[in-house]
Amino acid sequence: MYNTDMPTRAELPSSRKLIRSTLIALAAAATLLVTVVLPAEYAVDPTGIGKVLGLTEMGEIKQQLALEAAADEQTAVLIETLETAETQADERAADQVVDTEKVVSLAPVETAPERTDVVTLTLAPGEAAEVKLTMKKDGIAKYEWVTNQGHLNSDLHADGANKAFVSYRKGRSETSNTGEFIAGFEGVHGWFWRNRSDVDVEVTLRVSGAYSEVKRVL
């Protein structure tokens, strides 16, 4: 049986060729990292090639989805914690007997006055805005928002002192939305919009309910 002859020293690549091949491979890997991987995965585009190829927008979407997934996970943990606290409070209340003869009076519940506002914003392509209402716990707000053209991504959410971010509703590529919500705690509650269309979008928000202030925070 014949075995292949061992290559001679002259047939082996020189050290210079090996170093040159290694440097070429490293340069190619670095080029792919900067022009493809970073824009597509992290929306980092130092050369501008990712934007031309549409990879930067892909990276922005991935980063946004990652943030939204983290927010959803925080919301689920908060809801579970609140439900546990409410169950424990109900159990403690059931073990107590109220002596009605000792109840003299109950303090009135302080609520925010009813008010109505209209807010109009114009967002350029890719631009974002946020409008918040200052509300007491259990306050109710009714709303309607509509665009004049294009479409928006939206997130109706809330946050407050010692309270985690809570999302009431998310929307994608919408031109309008109508509804109402009840404030789960005292803090700021409102809307985040981002213009994902290729035209300027004017959004008009009409809101009414129990809140003390409405303002744009972004």
Image: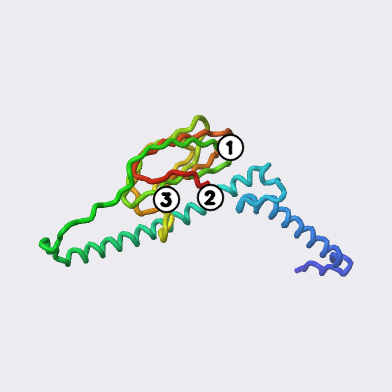
**Label 3 sits on what residue type?**
Val
From the top left corner, tell me how far across and down residue 194 is, in percent. Answer: 52, 42
Residue denoted by label 2:
64
Picture layout, residue 28 above or below residue 121: below
Q: Earlier in the sequence, mark 1 or mark 3?
A: 1
Q: Quadrant of residue 8?
A: bottom right
Q: Mark 3 Cα within 10 Å, few/some/many (few <14, many 20+)?
A: many
Q: How many labels does the image show?
A: 3
**Label 1 sits on what residue type?**
Ala
Residue denoted by label 1:
124
Q: Mark 2 Cα within 10 Å, few/some/many (few <14, many 20+)?
A: few
Residue denoted by label 3:
188
Q: In 3D space, how far apart are the residues under numbered discs 1 and 3 (Cα atoms)? A: 25 Å
Query: Residue at image x 47%, y 43%?
Result: 154
153 sits left or right of 90 in the view: right
From the top left corner, tell me how far across and down residue 47 is, in percent. Answer: 72, 49
Q: Which residue lies furthest to the front in this view?
A: 104
Picture layout, residue 67 above or below residue 129: below
Picture layout, residue 120 above or below residue 7: above
Dot 3 and dot 2 residues touching (CB under 8 Å): no
- Looking at the rendered structure, the secondary structure element under dot 2 is helix
**Label 2 sits on what residue type?**
Gln
Dot 2 and dot 1 residues touching (CB under 8 Å): no
Q: Give the camera-side residue of 180 and 100.
A: 100
Q: Residue furthest right?
A: 10
From the top left corner, tell me how far across and down residue 136 is, in percent. Answer: 35, 51
